[in-house]
Structure formats: structure tokens, C-alpha cells
Image (spheres, grey):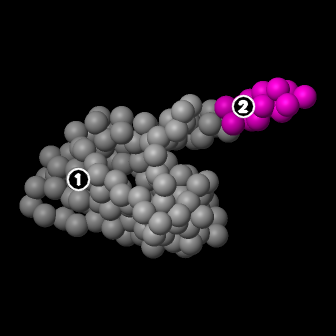
């Protein structure tokens, strides 16, 4: 009986993950991105500045998927009341900080692909990241060179 419950739970999680991935395959506009983040976060307050410069479509799509995955992690695991996205622009790059005020404890888990997918997406757009996770929340910082921007 316990084994059947585990199988049912696993199938349910796989189905949800599959649906999420199909949904992500559609190119996301900023307006759609904001709507998706709000939907994912539910009751969690969104304090985000989505007015960062546009990037080329490949970078823009990767960035959207990173933001969505971090919003999902916040919603599922953090017990946060606030999710934020800030950016700073200089001559060569745009630095992003995305995080929450939850319980912290961000770490890759067996059979979980969220953080691994963020790592892969950042590699695709030639960016490295740093993360911090304390009892006051989690944050991810990364830079994207403006050469990946349509405005560069």
C-alpha cells in the first residue's frame, strides 16, 4: 500500500513537471512572464522590477525560465511572504538579484532538477551565479553581458 502511494505520488509529480515543461516551451513575453510569476507565487507578495533591457530571444527565454523556476522554488519550499527581482545596469552587463524572505536552505536534492536547470540555463547564456541561503531567505545573483541584449 505504501509502495502504491509512492508510485502514485511519483506519477503525479512527473505529470505536473511534464505540464510545466510544455508550458515553458512557449516563448514568454514579459507581460506573460509577470502573469505566470504572480500565478505561481499565489499569496506571496511580488516585489519585482521587470523593466530590465531586452535581450536576444535565446537569452530572454533562458532568463524567463530561470525566473519561473526560482518563483516555483519559492512557492513550494521557502514559506516566504515576499519574492523579489532587482537588477543593476552598468556599461557592459546587467546584474540580477532574485530571491525571497523565506526559511532558506536552498540546495540541490536527489531527483530534483530545478537548481540544476538554473545552472544549465546560466551556462547557456554564459553567466555564472552566486547564491546565498540563510534563515532570512535565499538569493541568486548573476550577470548577463549586454552583448546578449538587442540594445547593445
Residue in view at x 30 percent, y 57 percent: 141
Can you say whether 44 is above or below 27 in the image? below
Q: Quadrant of residue 62?
A: top left
Q: Position of residue 61 (x, y in %)?
A: 38, 44
Q: Which residues are magenta?
A: 1-14
Q: Position of residue 112 (x, y in %)?
A: 54, 36
Residue at numbered disc 1: 143
Q: Quadrant of residue 126?
A: top left
Q: Position of residue 93 (x, y in %)?
A: 16, 55
Q: Main secondary structure of the magenta part?
A: helix
**Mark 2 and mark 1 in contact (Cβ < 8 Å)?**
no
* Residue 61 visible in the shown view: no
- Residue placed furthest toward the front: 135
Q: Is residue 8 magenta?
A: yes
Nearer mark to the viewer, of 1 and 2: 2
Residue in view at x 72 percent, y 31 percent: 10
Residue in view at x 52 percent, y 66 percent: 102
Q: In what element is the residue under mark 2?
A: helix
- As drawn, the label of residue 21 is none
Q: Position of residue 51 (x, y in %)?
A: 33, 67
38 to the left or right of 89: right
Residue in view at x 40 percent, y 42 percent: 118
Q: Work out which quarter of the rendered image holds the N terminus and state it.
A: top right
124 to the left or right of 46: left
Q: Earlier in the sequence, mark 1 or mark 2?
A: 2
14 to the left or right of 1: left
Label 1, label 2: how many angstroms apart (C-alpha)?
Answer: 35 Å
Residue at numbered disc 2: 10
User: 32 or 95, which lies in front?
Assistant: 95
Amino acid at each position: 500500500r505504501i509502495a502504491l502511494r509512492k508510485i502514485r505520488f511519483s506519477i503525479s509529480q512527473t505529470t505536473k513537471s511534464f505540464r510545466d515543461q510544455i508550458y515553458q516551451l512557449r516563448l514568454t513575453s514579459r507581460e506573460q512572464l509577470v502573469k505566470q510569476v504572480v500565478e505561481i507565487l499565489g499569496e506571496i507578495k511580488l516585489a519585482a522590477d521587470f523593466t530590465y533591457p531586452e535581450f536576444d530571444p535565446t537569452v530572454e527565454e533562458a532568463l524567463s525560465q530561470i525566473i519561473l523556476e526560482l518563483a516555483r522554488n519559492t512557492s513550494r519550499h521557502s514559506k516566504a511572504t515576499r519574492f523579489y527581482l532587482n537588477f543593476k545596469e552598468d556599461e557592459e552587463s546587467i546584474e540580477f538579484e532574485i530571491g525571497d524572505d523565506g526559511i532558506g536552505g536552498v540546495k540541490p536534492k536527489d531527483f530534483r532538477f530545478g537548481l540544476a536547470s538554473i545552472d544549465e540555463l546560466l551556462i547557456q547564456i554564459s553567466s555564472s551565479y552566486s547564491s546565498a541561503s540563510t534563515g532570512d531567505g535565499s538569493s541568486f545573483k548573476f550577470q548577463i553581458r549586454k552583448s546578449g541584449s538587442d540594445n547593445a
